[in-house]
Structures are given as structure tokens and as C-alpha cells.
Image (cartoon, helix red, strand yellow):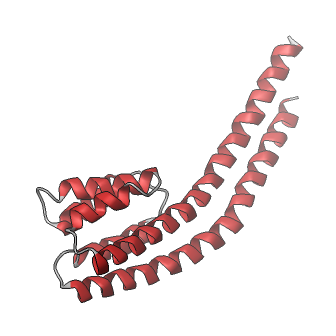
Amino acid sequence: MIFIKMMGLIGIFIGISTVGVLISNKYRDRVKELKEIKKALNMFETKIKFTYEPIPEIFQDISDNLIDNIAYMFRQASNTMQQKSARQAWEEALESSNFNITKEDIDILKGFGKLLGKTDMQGQLNQIQLTTNFVDIQIIKAEKEYEKNAKLYKTLSLVTGLALVIILI
């Protein structure tokens, strides 16, 4: 009987601790995804300047060089651009992707899509630069939130799990 009780308490402790770690990982993943988005924007800028390829092809190339969530977003946008405008394809890809980024981040990226494919090369480059600057600001905010909240959630879950185990003993 004591063995079963101990296993249950260990399970509770591990379960609560895992929840804290998963929540803190979302903060880490947001930073990683924003950095990947910045990397993608830089690749997009370079390809616009030097290759003169159509946007769907550029997005497909970009998706081959990124991590899962961001690569999926660019691949989805590239595929959807065959039937819809670049703006619609971009917004649908943003909405259908599974991110750890915030609504504020998504709004910034939607702003990027407003002029996507509608301006000349210089206008496109200016829009990429503007979006990159906004993403830089979001990366700084995300890193601060990660530093503050990741440790908080890990510690809070460990303390809560330990307190619950002590109470149940």
C-alpha cells in the first residue's frame, strides 16, 4: 500500500513539474521562432535583390532552410500563392501555422503581407527592412520574457509539486 502511495506521489510531482517545464519551453520556442523568422526575412531580402525569382519560388527555397513551424508557414504560403494573392496566402499561412509566437508578433507579420507582391523591388525591400526591425524589437521582448518567466514557471511547478506531495504524505 505504501509503495502504491509513493508511486502516486512521485507521479504527481513529475506531472506538475513537467507542466512547468512545458510552459517555460514555450517562451524559449518563441525566441527561436522569431529568430528563424528574421533569418527568413533576410533570405527573402537577399533573393529579391539578386535572383529576381517569383515570390512563391523564393518562399519554397526559404522553407527548405528553416525549422519546422516557420518552414511550414513559408511552404504553405508558397503553395497557396498558386490560387490566391500573395497577401491572402501569407495571412492564411500565418493563421494555419502552429506557433509559439504571440498575437502581437502575428500582427507584425500580417503587416508584412499587406504589400507583399504589390510594390516594386525597392518597395518590397523597404517593407522587408521595416518588418525585420519590428521582429528585432519582438526578439528583445521575447528574450526578456524568457529570462523572467522560464525560471519562474520551472521553479513554481517544482515548489507546487513538492508542496502537494508533502501535503498528501
Q: Split into 4 quadrants, where in the image is the C terminus?
A: top right
Residue placed most toward the observer, 87 or 81: 81
Seen as rendered, the residue at the extreme front is: 50
Asked if 104 appears above or below 164 in the picture, the reply is below
Q: Residue at x 85, y 10 (%)?
A: 1
Using residue 107 as the reference point, say whether residue 56 is left or right of it: left
Residue under the point 19% across and 75% down: 117
Q: Residue furthest left?
A: 83
Looking at the image, residue 39 sits to the left or right of residue 58; the answer is right
The quadrant where residue 77 appears:
bottom left
The x, y position of residue 157, in whole percent, is 74, 47
Tell whether 151 sits left or right of 65: right
- Compared with 20, 123 (above or below) is below
Q: Quadrant of residue 75?
A: bottom left
The percent position of residue 69, horizontal first and vertical second, equals 43, 52
Of 164 and 117, nearer the camera is 117
Residue 46 position within the rendered picture, expressed as x and y whole percent measured from the top left: 36, 76
Q: Nearer the viewer, residue 18 or 130?
A: 130
